[in-house]
Image: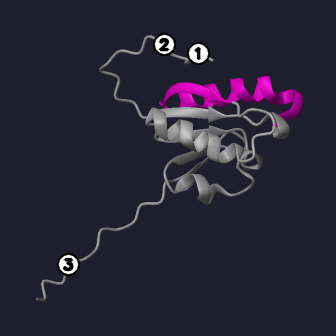
Amino acid sequence: MQPAEPDIPDGDRRPKAIGFVRGAVSGLDAPRHALAIERHARSLGLRYLYTVRPPQGATDPIGYALGIAAGLGAAAIVVYDLAHVDNQPARVCEDFNLETVCPPETWARVMYPAPIETGAA
């Protein structure tokens, strides 16, 4: 497996993204979905790093992709549709933005507000 952009300049500040394709979900359309995911990520101005394809028989393919995204410091995970994350965008949005190709949607990362200090002692 090779990164999509192996010679990325150090000054590239665009948010990093990975694609996520599950063969069990995409079936024979997996290559087409992977290409659509990469194109979509680039059209959004994301720095596309890699397409994750979990091993066949992985017990938690979503967790597999989340671990790789965290290790690469990705800001977003791009999927073809919500079926790739078992129609549970919240699982991804705990730590990453989720982008879908079909329909083109952004599921924003959950940001928890900072605790409010009351100043009372």
Position of 27 compared to 90: left or right? right
- Displayed quadrant of residue 111: bottom left
The answer for how far apart the CA atoms under marks 3 and 1 are is 47 Å
For the N terminus, the quadrant is: top right
* Mark 2 and mark 1: Cα distance apart in space: 8 Å
N-terminal label among 3 and 1: 1
- Image side of residue 14 versus residue 1, left or right: left
For label 1, the SS is loop
Residue 119 visible in the picture: yes
- Which of the labelled discs sits on residue 117, or is there none? 3
Element type where label 2 sits in the image: loop
| 117 shown above or below 94 | below
Q: Earlier in the sequence, mark 3 or mark 2?
A: 2
Disc marking residue 12: none
Contact? badges 2 and 1 (CB < 8 Å): yes
Mark 1 residue type: Gln
Q: Which residue is mark 2?
A: 6
Residue at the image point whose x is 72% and y is 49% from the top? 82
User: In this image, 51 relative to 117: left or right?
Assistant: right
Q: Quadrant of the C terminus?
A: bottom left
* Chain part drawn in magenta: 26-52
Q: Amino acid at mark 3?
A: Glu
**Residue at x 49%, y 52% (from the top left corner):** 95
Q: Position of residue 94 (x, y in %)?
A: 51, 57
Q: Where is residue 43, by image quadrant? A: top right
- The disc label shown at residue 2, or none: 1
